[in-house]
Image: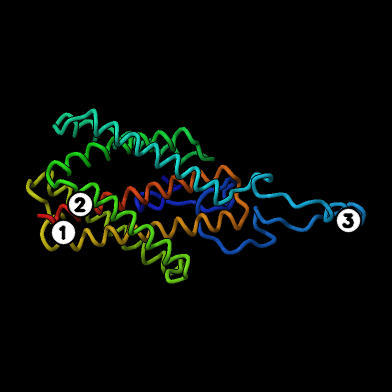
Amino acid sequence: MRSSSNPVFSRRGFSRDNGYAGFGYGPAPTAGHPYAQGAPQDLTAEELRRMYQAPAASPAQSGRMTIDDVVMRTAMTLGTVLVGALLAWVVLPVSRTSYGVAMVAALVAFVLGMVQTFKAAPKPALILGYAAFEGIFLGVVSKMFNAAWAGAPVQAVLGTMAVSAGMLIAYRTGLVKVTDRYKRVGMAIAIGFVLLTFANLLFAAFGGGDGLGLRSGGLGVVVGIVGVLLGAFFLSLEFRCVEDGIRHGAPQRESWLAAFGLTVSLVWIYLEMLRLISILRD
């Protein structure tokens, strides 16, 4: 998912370095920026006068991305995740078969995300398809966690909302600044986190038990907190993406990529919250 800040995938920027738009973190628009509106060239004085006297076009009229576009697409994507999760919760019982269905859904969601990665432009069908299958996965997993720790999914949802709101406030007030150093350090930690998690899964699969013990006890709590903080870090990158896209006058279709990135980050936080709550309640 190149449109996601999930460290498993690369990112693109709201620029046209490779001939198409995507996510990234560039400077403020300049005369050389592909989306910046430069001064008109080779126009007569009368043409310039008529141009400047004409009413200004709104972002929607000019086909540029607005915050309303991002909010609407994000609501659609998260709504699809929610529908898929509720459907899985109601229809699928807690069983090995349901767990298998969840793993298949997660794999399909991953594949759809990867296909979107290599598309030159956002494809709403791929993004909504990812959301639907991700929702099925989350519905099954949430029901399993709820069976073991009653109320854990609700607590995880509330925790995700709190973390998201906190990061948004921190970003908007300038408490968190997305600088190059901030991104480098955060992504280095994220890559290390993913590699460590993967190693833990391998040890658990071939050695049995809890692998390296990263998801239990005191160490599990620390790892869970780091995971939640990384999710907040990803959100801050997404906020910067949206801000840069609107400032640079990115095309309206790019709001789908913003919605995709925000959804991936929120799913990350929710899953880490779910794991952390289960460890704390044990």
How would you rate the neighbour count of disc 1 (Cα within 10 Å): few for under 14, some for 14-19, many for 20 or more?
some
How would you rate the neighbour count of disc 3 (Cα within 10 Å): few for under 14, some for 14-19, many for 20 or more?
few
Tag of residue 275: 2
Classify mark 1: helix, strand or loop: helix
Closer to the eye: label 1 or 3: 3
Lateral position of residue 216 relative to residue 16, left or right: left
User: Callout 3, which amino acid?
Assistant: Arg
Classify mark 3: helix, strand or loop: helix
Tag of residue 220: 1
> Mark 2 and 3 residues: CB-CB less than 8 Å, in contact?
no
Classify mark 2: helix, strand or loop: helix
Residue 63, image quadrant: top right
Residue toward you, 238 or 274: 274
Instruction: Give the spatial CA distance, label 1 vs label 3.
Output: 67 Å
User: Callout 2, which amino acid?
Assistant: Arg
Pinpoint residue 241: horizontal percent, then vertical percent.
50, 56
Q: Which residue is mark 3?
A: 49
| Marks 2 and 3, the one that precedes in the sequence | 3
Relative vertical location of residue 260 with respect to residue 97 in this rendering, above or below: below
Lateral position of residue 93 relative to residue 81, left or right: left
> Mark 1 and 2 residues: CB-CB less than 8 Å, in contact?
yes
Pinpoint residue 26: horizontal percent, then vertical percent.
55, 61
